[in-house]
DNA sequence: CCAAAAGTGTTGTTGATACACCCATGT
DNA sequence: ACATGGGTGTATCAACAACACTTTTGG
């Protein structure tokens, strides 16, 4: 689910770390934020300073308001942390083990989101939270069931990325074919053949070749491409299938 | 399908239609029950007799208890209606539009389940609810957002059935290859080639050929096969991929 | 010149697709 | 005999994997 979220935030919510009660009692929101930095898939984690989980890291969390859908609440919470809107957001599922939080019964609706690292670096300078990027295989022991939520979201990302061109949300607008290939290699944890990858992705005719090349690289500069959602839309309407 | 209530059910819950509050306030469960009858994919719907949605049909619903996971609650509610256990159950997602139920704010965790029609016919003779099977394209206008939940679950079924051999849950233990093909045709809404389907499915070596044939059919009797979860498990451990 | 990545070409193999055809059985 | 579905065989084409090769550019 993608959606936009306007500048004027309707409601600022109390941080996750607080022990404040949700308006809808017993329901929280947790959101895994993925990003791709050069060669590595990374996750944004939030440091918890107060409460029972003080000193540990967790996925971005929050609470829904009474008059908003949980999906919108997730967008709002994301905006509060990153100042980003127009983010790719997808619901995972509800995590509902009665013992997932020791002190009280609370279920959480899990989400994952894909952000372009450049946009994040520009916008997310101010935040109430202390947040940090972790390489996906260097994630520490997290609060509650957040390790489970994270590993579930990674699986989901691996699945989805094969079926729909959502990976582009992790890249800058203009990218090279090799960057794109490295992204897939990193997410899927496999090695790919350069030549075969090119043929396959170009054959899909999803990408627009730009009149631009890489700059300041110490080797032959590669052509830049961009992903065009309009083209994708037209192709899917014709029964196109992105199967990676 | 109305009648008395019996058997020892672990926890008796109030029916969905009642306006009773859940222990975890604001959270309900809705479960789409799929089945395959000869040629048609069908859904089990429950008739609502009391409350604001009296006279209309909906998906099977219920409320969780404080000390059980929502997944377990779904299994319990399913058992209460169908007397079936050991059922294939998968969570869809949370449906959370603040206006999805007019009178109060309640989110629901959606599930779908696949049942073998023969087992159902044997076991589900008794139930507090009036329930009826509907062909998938003859489903009426349902209560709340249940039409949305249903169409979402159908999409999910179509996706999952291509990636994992879950379709077998809809068939009797012993089946013919053509039955299996018809199942896929019906779920995916496509036509398939008999010969090619055979080759493909047999080539996967998922099926066990039985020493048995169809009986009482007015044409050449077909060999019966069964799906062996053990074989599937072994294959997946070796990196097998069921991609339909 | 060399390193490093960009980009092209070739070849063998596999699997999907579209058929045509024969077989067994009840009415 | 014929309708109905069961079951086999085959030719063609597209996709994929593996790999060798040439090109461009900065240092």
Image (cartoon, coloured by chain):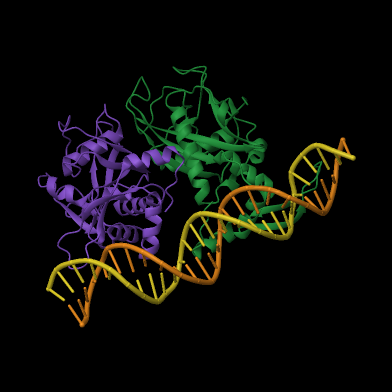
Chain colours: A purple, B green, C orange, D yellow
Q: Height in image: B236 above or below B218?
A: below
Q: Is residue B8 visible?
A: no
Q: Where is residue A55 in the image (x, y as percent from the top left)?
A: 17, 55
Q: Position of residue A179 (x, y in %)?
A: 27, 59
Q: Which residue is drawn at 41% across and 22% down?
A: B19
Left or right, B160 with reference to B124? left
Left or right, B93 with reference to A121? right
- Front residue of this view, candidates B4 and D1: D1
Q: Position of residue B223 (x, y in %)?
A: 74, 52
- Front residue of this view, candidates C24 and B228: C24
- Front residue of this view, candidates A216 and A189: A216
Q: Image quadrant of residue B139?
A: top right
Q: Which residue is drawn at 30% across and 31% down?
A: A69
Q: Height in image: B28 above or below A196?
A: above
Q: Image quadrant of residue A190?
A: bottom left
Left or right, B235 with reference to B126? left
């Amino acid at each position: 689910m993608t959606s936009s979220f306007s500048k004027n935030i309707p409601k600022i919510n109390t941080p996750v770390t607080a022990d404040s009660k949700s308006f809808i009692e017993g329901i929280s929101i947790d959101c895994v934020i993925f990003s791709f930095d050069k060669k590595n898939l990374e996750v944004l984690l939030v440091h918890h300073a107060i409460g029972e989980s003080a000193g540990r890291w967790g996925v971005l969390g929050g609470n829904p308001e009474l008059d908003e859908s949980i999906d919108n609440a997730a967008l709002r919470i994301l905006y509060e942390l990153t100042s980003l809107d127009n983010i790719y957001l997808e619901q995972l599922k509800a995590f509902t083990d009665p013992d997932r939080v020791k002190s009280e019964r609370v279920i959480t609706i899990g989400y994952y989101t894909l952000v372009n690292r450049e946009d994040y670096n520009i916008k997310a300078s101010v935040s109430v939270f202390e947040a940090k990027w972790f390489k996906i295989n260097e994630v520490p022991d997290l609060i509650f069931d957040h390790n489970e939520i994270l590993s579930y979201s990674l699986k989901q990302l691996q699945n989805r990325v094969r079926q729909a061109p959502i990976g582009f949300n992790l890249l800058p607008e203009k990218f090279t074919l090799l960057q794109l290939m490295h992204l897939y290699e990193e997410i899927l944890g496999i090695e790919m053949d350069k030549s075969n990858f090119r043929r396959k992705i170009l054959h899909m005719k999803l990408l627009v070749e730009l009149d631009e090349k890489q700059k300041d690289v110490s080797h032959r500069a590669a052509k830049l491409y961009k992903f065009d959602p309009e083209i994708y839309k037209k192709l899917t309407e014709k029964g196109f299938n992105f199967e990676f």
